[in-house]
Image: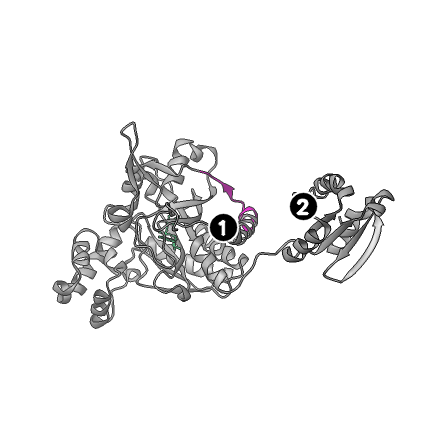
Amino acid sequence: MAPKHQAPRGTRDLLPADTTLWSWAEQAARGVLARYGFGELRTPIFEDYELFARTAGESSDVVQKEMYRFTDLGERALALRPEFTAGVMRAYLEHGLGGRARVHRLWSTGPVFRYGRPQKGRYRQFHQLNCELVGSPAPGADVEMITLFVDLYEAWGFRDLTVLVNSVGQPASRRIYGDRLREWLAPVHDRLSADSQARLVTNPLRVLDTKDEGDHALFRELGAMPRLLDVLDAADRQHWDAVVAGLDAAGVKYEIDHGLVRGLDYYTRTAFEVHDRSLGAQSALGGGGRYDGLVEMLGGAPTPGVGFAIGLDRALLVLEERGVKADEPDVVCLVSMDATRAAATALARELRREFVVECDVEARGFGAQMKAAGKSGARFLVLMGEEEWKRGEVALKDSKTGTQETLAREALAAAIRAKKGEAK
Ligand code: HAM
């Protein structure tokens, strides 16, 4: 019989077999983030609806079709976070972080929610690893963030990633670019999708983000698309040149993608993404950029910032498909007899300060315990025979080397440690 309840569409359970890899990836990321001097920030999973609506952009898919909005019992208009950046900047202002230090490096992780059509790599509840460098307008900050972005993937075993970069300029250059796009698209205007025609009026850049195949065919028909980089003003251009030079100096591989516009409206100047074609349509593994106007949108003093989010579900999907496995710990399994059962509980507790230990809790016989140990793949078996135990000894079997030795109970931990090759 099918169970009465199933996880809501677009959400999934991560079972212990899955979370081992997730925990490993998170641990590896924590190490990289600590070495880059980032501090962890935890913000609420829901915020005022207005916070997201104002920052993501009225014409973005996130606001128009994807937000999980709700009204709570106190009639407050709230939304589950569709991304981290708005909440991070809200917290930055609320706690006056700007007054405490000039530059802040903040990272966060957890579930985010977007109401989309679920498919491979696309969920309604997914997970991001989000990083923001707040307070510096310098191109060096963009370079450091793109370097961190790549180093996080590399810590998970990704190699030779190519980051796609572009500059979306400041609002003034974007307006000029919008006019160029309208002129370029004028001959095919009536054949564009209804969505793109509407976007051409409200936010022309967003047309480049269209998922409609017909639109893309029209773009190809028209040929050379106007480039944002060609309409940047002198200051934006200088910033862009410095970012590209910085990436070269840092040895980061990148490609300039003139069609890269990002799905949220708060970006200024640098925008970047990384893709993996093995994911099919949902190929973006992560993305980000600079957002110098965002804090002002929230009523704060002008504060530059640059950041990115990595889609953890997608990154882990790729790793799983490549057969990447988290390191399995060497397990120690205690095998006791009736007479040593009680002692096994105490010994297990002691060894668990240091090792992963399995110990029977069902008063099973010696044979059943041995069978269970074989099945679980434990490397070390500690055989607690009655006579040996009385003499203060146990037998240690190492199934990796196939050796067995009898040793003093007190020498057990040191012997396991030595065999694992971990001098303590
Ligand atoms: P975003 O490009 O909207 O950026 O999302 C970042 C990543 O989240 C995507 O590249 C993708 O891997 C993952 N993602 C997005 N939607 C889904 C989904 N439905 N299912 C699974 N994964 C998904 C942001 O969210 C910005 N806040 C990044 C940022 C931080 N910009 C500046 N600071």
Q: Position of residue 166 (x, y in %)?
A: 35, 59
Q: What percent of the width, then of the height, locates residue 72?
A: 30, 31
How far apart are the alpha carbons under marks 2 and 1?
23 Å
Count of labels shown?
2
Q: Give coordinates of residue 331: x percent, y percent.
A: 67, 52
* Residue 135 sits in quarter: top left
Q: Which residues are magenta?
A: 32-42
Dot 1 amino acid type: Leu
Name the residue beneath numbered marker 1. Answer: 15
Q: Which label is found at residue 29?
A: none
Asked whether mark 1 lies closer than 8 Å to ligand 1, one says: no
For label 2, the crowd category at 10 Å Cα-Cα, with few meaning under 14, some 14 to 19 and many 20 or more, is many
Query: Residue 64: x, y in percent?
Result: 24, 47
Residue name at image x 51 percent, y 51 percent = 19
Which residue is more in the foreground, 235 or 379? 379
In-image side of 234 versus 401 (left or right): left
- The crowding category of the residue bearing disc 1, from other C-alpha atoms within 10 Å (few below 14, some 14 to 19, many at least 20), is few
> Within the magenta stretch, is there residue 393?
no
What residue type is disc 2 on? Asp
Residue position marked by numbered label 2 in the rendering: 360
Q: Is residue 39 magenta?
A: yes
Left or right placement of residue 82 versus residue 201 in this view: right
Q: Who is closer to the viewer here, 102 or 48?
A: 48
Secondary element at image label 1: loop
Farthest residue in the top direction? Answer: 74
Mark 2 or mark 1, earlier in chain: 1
